[in-house]
Amino acid sequence: MPFNALFSWVIKKRIHQIDLFRKFPLEVQQELFFRMLKHAANTTFGKKHNFNKISAYETFKNIVPLQTYEEFKSDVDQLIAGEKNMRWPGTTSWFAKSSGTTSNRSKFIPVTKDSLFDCHYKGGKDLLALYYTNYPDRKLYNAKHLIVGGSAKINPIGINSYLGDLSAIIVKNLPWWAEIRRTPSREIALMDDWEKKLDKMAKQTIKEDVCIIAGVPSWTLVLCNRILEITGKQNLKEVWPNLELFMHGGVSFQPYKKEFDRIIQDPSMHYIETYNASEGFFGIQDNPETDDLLLMLDYGIFYEFIPMSEYEGTNSKHVISLADVALDTNYALVISTNGGLWRYILGDTISFTSLLPYKFKITGRTQSFINCFGEEVIVDNAEKAMAYACSQTNSILKEYTVGPKFMEDTSKGGHEWLIEFVQKPTSLEAFTHSLDQELRNLNSDYDAKRTKDLALESPLCHIVPTGTFDRWLQGKGKLGGQNKVPRLSNDRKILEEVLTLITKG
C-alpha cells in the first residue's frame, strides 16, 4: 500500500472517536473529568484540594478556586526550577511563552508530555483527519508542510528544559511521520532573529513542493510576500503548484482573506481555522461551509464557562459545566488540563452556535484588547504606554481609541490611534516614538511583531479636535455618567465612526 494511502487510512480512524464525542459529549467530558482527578490525586495540588475525595463536579467547584496566571505563577517558577509532581505527575520540561499579563512581560505556560502528545499533536492529526473526510482522495503526504513557527530559548536550569513559543516546542518534538514532511529545516524553524529567519525560510521553501501552510495569518503573509519578491512570481501557485490548504489560527482570519486570495489566486484553495493556544488545543473548523469550530472534548481538557454578564474574574460566582451552556451567550472559558492547569481562566470568550455537537465561535477576550496580528495588546499595556509618552513629551491626554490598520497589497499592518489632548505634544513624531517604544518594553508579542517592521509598522497617531469624543458619545446617547470611550478594538468600526465625525465637522 503506498505510504500516502496508508497515512490516510490510519488518520481517518480517528474520525470514529470524534464522532463519539459529537454524539455523546457530556459522557465523554464526565469520564475525562474523573480520569484527570484520579491521575493528579497524588500531586501537590491534588493533595491540597483532596482530589481523591471528589465524586461530583459541584464538589470540585466548591473546593478548587478559579485561577489566573497571577495565582499560580509561583508554581510555574518552581516547575521551571525542576520541581516534580506539583500540578501534574512527573517533571514538566517545556514552557510555552504566551502574551504578557498586567504584571509580567511574558507568561510561561507549562506543557507536559501528556498535553503535548494527547492535546496539541492530537489536534494536528484530527485536523488532517477531518480534512481528508471533507476532501477525499487528497494526497497531502506526497508534498511538504510549511510550518511558520516561533523560536525556542534553552532554559539554563537544565539542558532538557526549555522555554519558547508553543510552535517551537511542537517542532522540537514532532513525531517522525510529521517531521519527514515538514519544512523548513529545524535549524531555520527555531531561529529567534525573525528578519534572518524569514529570509532563510523563503529561500529554502521555494525549492520545495509545498501543499500545506500552517501559521498565524500576519506572519504568514510577511513570509509569502518575501517569497514572491525573491522569485518574481505573480502568485504562490506559480511557486507551489500543489498548494491547497492553509491552516490558520491565533487571530481572526477575516481581515486577511482578501489578501491571501490575491497572492494565491486559486478559488479551490482551502482555509481551515484552528484554536490552538499555549494552554491547549480547543477547536477545529470541521465544516468548511461554516466558520464555527468543533469543541474538541477528549484532549485532556475539562471545560467550564462563566457567563460574561456575571463575570467577576476569580471572584465569579456563576460557573457552569458544558451541560448547562446555552446558544448565543458570551462565556469566559475556564479550563482544567493535562498540562497542570486547574480551573484556569483562559481570558478568551466564546459563544456556542450548536449544542449537538458543541460548536462555537471565538468572540474576544475578557478584557479589551487588540490581537489582529498576534500582538495581544491589552488595555493595561496601552494605558501605561500612553502615560509614559505623555510624560516624555509634556503632553496631557483627554481621550483616545485604538484600532487596527490592516495589511493591503504589500504594506504592513499596524495600529491607528485617535488621540484627543488637553495639552498637545510639541512633536507628534516624538510622542509616537515614545508610545511605540514603551509598548515594546511592556509586551513581548508586540515587540516581536514590531522588530524591524516585519509584521507591524510604527503606530499611526492622529490628534483629533477638542470635543471629538464627547460628540461621538453624544451621538451614541452615552454622553455623561459612567460611559467611556472604548480604548482598544479588534476592528475598525469605532475608528471609522470617529473619523467620519471629524470629516463632517
Image: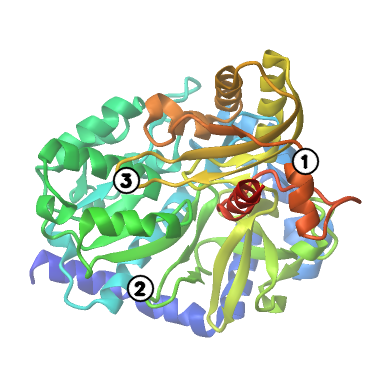
Q: Residues within 10 Å of mark 3 (few under 14, many from 20)?
A: many
Nearer to us in this view, 345 or 86: 345
Residue at x-position 48% and y-position 56%: 252
Disc number lying in front (3 or 1): 1
Q: CA distance from mark 3 to mark 2?
A: 32 Å
Q: Secondary structure at mark 1?
A: loop
Q: Amino acid at mark 1?
A: Gly
Residue at x-position 59% and y-position 22%: 428
What residue is disc 2 on?
14
Q: Residue furthest front?
A: 505
Query: What is the x, y in percent for residue 347?
Result: 65, 51
**Is 416 positioned to the left or the right of 6 in the image?**
right
What residue is disc 3 on?
221
What residue is disc 1 on?
467
Q: Amino acid at mark 2?
A: Arg
**Is 200 positioned to the left or the right of 157 in the image?**
left
